[in-house]
Amino acid sequence: MEQLQKWAHVAEITGAIAVVLSLLYVGYQVKENTEAQQSETEMNLFTLGYELDSWYKDPDFVALVAQADSDYSALSLTGQLQYERYVLMQLNLWAYALKSFERGQIDAGEWQAWNNYFTVEIGRAGWRAAYDKWRDGYHPNFQQHVDSAIRAP
């Protein structure tokens, strides 16, 4: 009987060790998955940003941006629509970066870099005009974030 109790204790200890090892392995897998997801999200942000920056290869669009920033109201209706679509796509990218940060899909440093960039952009006259026109089309949390960026010194 004593021998049986010893084997029961050994089995109990072995089982406990197996559970701990299993938990460590699951933790490692979660960490790996999180890092892969963060990397994928960062790549999505860079790809989307690159695609939007490609608009600047068109000299007519660059002229449109310059005009929007100096006197947005002087743009033709067509020019306003084109510029607004560009700004809205950028705002969507900012909203995506914010949501990704809130979900832990990008780290604080990555978020801060994107947020700093967009905070500067929203200070431009054309951006503000487009945002003010389409503001209500965004999630209230994002609206609050952008509004606080606008109010920041």
Image (spheres, rainbow, N blue to C red):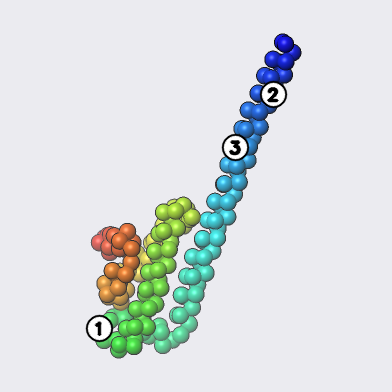
Compared to residue 145, the image places residue 23 above or below, namely above
Numbered-mark total: 3
Say which of 70 and 104 sits in front: 104
- Which callout, 3 or 2, points to the residue nearer the camera? 2
Q: Amino acid at mark 1?
A: Ser
Pointers 3 and 2 in contact (CB under 8 A)? no
Q: Is residue 145 visible?
A: no
Read off the residue under disc 3.
23
Q: Is residue 37 above or below residue 47?
A: above
Looking at the image, which residue is at 45% across and 58% down? 100
Give the SS element for disc 1: helix
Q: Which amino acid, mark 3?
A: Leu
At 41% from the left edge and 88% from the top edge, which residue is drawn?
60
Element type where label 2 sits in the image: helix
From the image, tell me which residue sits under label 2. 11
Q: Nearer the viewer, residue 141 or 91?
A: 141
